[in-house]
Amino acid sequence: QVRLAESGGGLVQPGGSLRLSCVVGGSVFHINSAAWYRQTPGLQRESVARIAAIGSTSYADSVKGRFTISRDDADNTVFLQMNNLKPGDTAVYYCYADVVTPEGLRVDAWGQGTPVTVSS
């Protein structure tokens, strides 16, 4: 079983910063790609940032230049550094990981989400 645990969300003023963390635990041999998504009530979940196994990254246009995704494979952790936050960034942020188990199975795993509120 693969478990993702996000942390780091909270309330921040416009222009502020937050750093989200996602620890990938359980039956993990290797993490292929990983990503952060976000969702606001009534809207579809949208991709915010992705990082491939080799470390290449991609971002939604709305967060380019402000957000940075990174990974620490030694600790099976994925990060999202969010700077210059705007009220439009308010959402529940979800971590996703494409995981290979020791048995060679591939698992699509999701976290429970961490809320981010940007407000003065």
Image: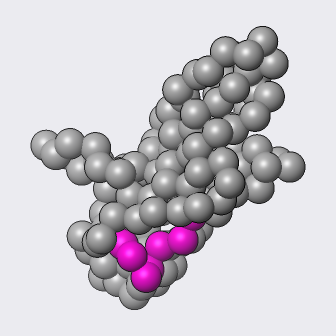
Q: Position of residue 70 (x, y in %)?
A: 64, 63
Measured along the vertical axis of the image, is residue 61 above or below residue 99? below
Residue 118 seen by the camera: no
Residue 49: quarter of image: bottom left
Q: Looking at the rendering, in which quadrant would you find the C terminus?
A: bottom left
In the rendered structure, the answer to whether residue 114 lies left or right of residue 71 reads: left
**Count of picture labels:** 0
Residue at (67% x, 15% y) in the render: 105
Measured along the vertical axis of the image, is residue 105 above or below residue 52? above
Q: Position of residue 116 (x, y in %)?
A: 41, 60
Residue 105 seen by the camera: yes
Magenta residue span: 63-69
Residue at (77% x, 56% y) in the render: 72
Q: Looking at the rendering, in which quadrant would you find the N terminus?
A: top right
Identity of the residue furthest to the top in this view: 103
Q: Position of residue 45 (x, y in %)?
A: 28, 43
In the rendered structure, the answer to whether residue 44 lies left or right of residue 111 reads: left
Front in this rendered view, residue 114 or 109: 109
Q: Is residue 82 magenta?
A: no
Residue at (58% x, 33% y) in the render: 98
The image's colouring method is one colour
Identity of the residue furthest to the left in this view: 42
Q: Position of residue 53 (x, y in %)?
A: 66, 48
Front in this rendered view, residue 105 or 82: 105
In the rendered structure, the answer to whether residue 77 lies left or right of residue 90 reads: right
In the rendered structure, the answer to whether residue 33 lies left or right of residue 86 reads: right
